[in-house]
Amino acid sequence: GDSVKLKLPELKVEKVLKLEPGATCLVVKGKHAGKKVKLKEIRQGSESIAPRAALEDNGQEILTLASYLFVVGDEI
């Protein structure tokens, strides 16, 4: 899902980082864990298939579960 950038120590929300095409994400699980990627699209799932994300990693397209993504923005 979306991520929130907080200002510390006030805990003030500075920015909401949307999980949408073009977002910079970190893959946090699976065989692509640790990669910083660009989200191309989210492919909707069904009752038995979880939504998948098409990602760009150094010019190559990879697929992973959308739930494995954490939106980080361009700051890192």
Image: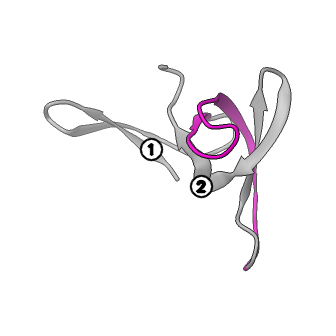
The residue nearer to you, when weighing 21 against 27, is 27
Q: Residue furthest front?
A: 31
Residue type, label 1: Ser
The residue nearer to you, when weighing 61 against 34, is 34
Which residue is painted at 19% across and 39% down in the image? 11
Which residue is painted at 14% across and 31% down in the image? 9
Residue type, label 2: Ser
Q: Which circle marks residue 33 in the picture?
A: none
Label 2 and label 1: CA atoms lie apart by 12 Å
- Residues drawn in magenta: 24-47
Q: To which quarter of the image does residue 34 belong?
A: top right
Q: Is residue 44 above or below residue 75?
A: below
Residue 64 at what x, y percent from top left?
73, 48
Label 2 sits on residue:
67
Q: Residue furthest right?
A: 60
Label 1 sits on residue:
3
Residue 26 at what x, y percent from top left?
57, 34
Element carrying mark 2? helix
Q: Label 1 crowding class (10 Å Cα cut-off): few <14, some 14-19, many 20+?
A: some
The residue nearer to you, when weighing 6 against 64, is 64
Q: Is residue 36 above or below residue 63?
A: above
Marks 2 and 1, the one that precedes in the sequence: 1
Residue 70 at what x, y percent from top left?
53, 42
Which residue is painted at 75% across and 63% down in the image? 44
